[in-house]
Image (cartoon, rainbow, N blue to C red):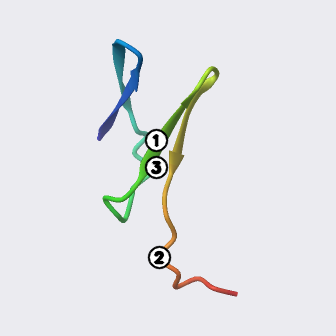
Amino acid sequence: MTVKLTQHESQTMLPIPDSIIPKSDRYTVFQTPDGAILFLPQDGSNKS
């Protein structure tokens, strides 16, 4: 799987490591100056 990072007029396609498997299609990718953050929402089933 890949994600597309868009910043201003440029775009970059980055691969997501095979060890990260989003269980939901509702994930968000944040681009930072140092890289990217993949945010996976919790489904709420692991409440403590």
Q: Quadrant of residue 2?
A: top left
User: With respect to residue 48, does 23 lie above or below?
Assistant: above
User: With respect to residue 42, does 9 lie above or below?
Assistant: above
35 to the left or right of 1:
right
Q: Amino acid at mark 3?
A: Ser
For the N terminus, give its image quadrant. Answer: top left
Closer to the camera: disc 3 or disc 2? 2
User: With respect to residue 27, does 13 lie above or below?
Assistant: above
Q: Quadrant of residue 32?
A: top right
Element class at badge 3: loop
The residue carrying mark 2 is 43
Mark identifier at residue 29: 1
Instruction: Report the label total.
Output: 3
Q: Picture coordinates of residue 48 (x, y %)?
A: 70, 87
Q: Picture coordinates of residue 16 (x, y %)?
A: 40, 38
Mark identifier at residue 38: none
**For the view shown, which residue lies furthest in the front direction?**
8
Element class at badge 1: strand
